[in-house]
Amino acid sequence: MATAVSRGSYYKSRSQKFLESRGFVVCAMHFTGWMKRGADRFVPFTRDLFGADLLAVAPDDCWFVQCKGGASWRDQLAAARKKFMQYPVPHGASQVILGWEPQARTPEILIVAMGPQPAKHPVIIPPRRHPKSLPLFARPA
C-alpha cells in the first residue's frame, strides 16, 4: 500500500521530468531539518518553500509549481490556492498547479497567479467544469 508521502514523491518526480522535457531547469523547493522533542529526542520534518514543491526556470519564464495527483487531486485545489496566496509573486513569475489524472501522460496545468503580485494576492479561480444548478427556492419563476 502506497503512503501519502510516496504518492506525492511519485507525482513530484513525474512533474519534474515533464517540465525538464519542456526546457525548464527544475529544483525541489523544500527544507528538511530536525526538531527537538524532549531532552534527547529529535524528529525529522520537511516544509515547502514559498508554498511550492518545485521551482521551474526557463530563459523567459519562472514557475513556482505545486504537484497534485490521483483520482481526487481536484479536492486539494482550494488548499493549494490558499497556500500560494500567502506569498508574493515576482515580476515574470507564475504560481502553477500541475494536476495528474490517473493514467494520464500529461498533467493539467492551472495558473494560480502571475507576477508581479503582493502577498495576500487574489488568485485565479477558473469557472466550474459542470455548473451547479440553483436550488428550487432560488430559481427564477
Image: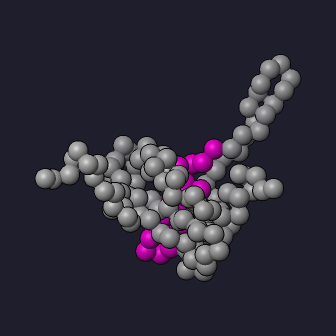
Residue 32 in the image, given as x and y percentages of width and height = 71, 45
Residue 50 in the image, given as x and y percentages of width and height = 52, 49
Image quadrant assignment for residue 94:
bottom left
Which quarter of the image is occupied by the N terminus?
Answer: bottom right
Segment colored magenta: 47-66
Residue 77 within the magenta-colored segment of the rendering: no
Q: Is residue 89 above or below residue 71?
A: above
Drawn side of residue 54 relative to residue 122, left or right: right
Residue at the extreme top: 39
Residue 27 in the image, given as x and y percentages of width and height = 63, 63
How many labels sit on residues?
A: 0
Drawn side of residue 141 relative to residue 130, left or right: left
Colour scheme in use: one colour
> Is residue 124 visible from the viewing direction of this image?
no
x 61%, y 79%: residue:
105
> Is residue 53 visible from the viewing direction of this image?
yes
Q: Is residue 58 above or below residue 49?
A: below
Residue at the extreme right: 40
Residue 48 within the magenta-colored segment of the rendering: yes
Residue 75 in the image, given as x and y percentages of width and height = 52, 53
Drawn side of residue 70 relative to residue 90, left or right: right
x 38%, y 44%: residue:
119
Q: Is residue 98 above or below residue 36?
A: below
Drawn side of residue 39 relative to residue 85, left or right: right
